[in-house]
């Protein structure tokens, strides 16, 4: 995922939107102008342009979901480590559960955002 993060840092920042010219060619624009000449059946071109336009937002949401799941995994590791739970200086079970729950909530919110971005149900 670090490659995806690096890619997002160097690509044209969003938001990107699809636009069409008189010939039906697809345009994807962000803060800079990008032309995406679509190939393939004309019926697929609008869907292709939409997917290209969604790519930066989907990549960012994917990275957020990964971070949330990493957090949940760390909290779960504490819960499953009997030695960490016995130590007075260790993380409390309640704190680990709270972290795990918060991470799950964040991951679900990110998935909801992905659904909103893509129009999925």
Image (cartoon, rainbow, N blue to C red):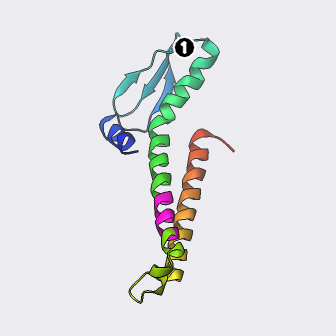
- Where, by quadrant of the figure, is residue 7 drawn? top left
- Where, by quadrant of the figure, is residue 34 drawn? top left
In the image, what residue occupies the spot 54% across and 13% down?
A: 24
In the image, what residue occupies the spot 46% across and 59% down?
A: 70
Q: Is residue 68 above or below residue 36?
A: below
In the image, what residue occupies the spot 69% across and 45% down?
A: 121
Tell which residue pokes out farthest to the bottom in this image.
Answer: 88
Q: Nearer the viewer, residue 87 or 34?
A: 87
Q: Main secondary structure of the magenta part?
A: helix
Is 24 one of the magenta-colored residues? Answer: no
| Residue 44 percent across, percent down from the top left | 61, 18
Q: Nearer the viewer, residue 112 or 62?
A: 62
Q: Is residue 31 above or below residue 44?
A: below
What residue did someone put label 1 on? 24
Query: Which span is picked out in magenta?
Result: 68-76
Q: Is residue 26 above or below residue 95?
A: above
- Crowding at dot 1, Cα within 10 Å, few <14 / some 14-19 / many 20+, comes out as few
Q: Nearer the viewer, residue 23 or 55?
A: 55
């Amino acid at each position: 995922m670090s490659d995806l993060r690096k890619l997002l840092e160097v690509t044209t920042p969003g938001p990107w939107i699809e636009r069409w010219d008189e010939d039906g060619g697809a345009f994807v624009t962000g803060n800079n102008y990008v032309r995406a000449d679509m190939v393939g059946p004309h019926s697929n071109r609008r869907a292709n342009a939409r997917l290209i336009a969604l790519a930066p937002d989907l990549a960012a949401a994917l990275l957020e979901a990964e971070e949330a799941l990493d957090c949940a995994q760390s909290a779960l590791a504490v819960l499953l480590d009997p030695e960490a739970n016995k130590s007075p200086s260790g993380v409390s079970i309640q704190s680990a559960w709270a972290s795990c729950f918060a991470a799950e909530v964040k991951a679900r919110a990110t998935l909801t955002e992905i659904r909103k971005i893509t129009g999925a149900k």
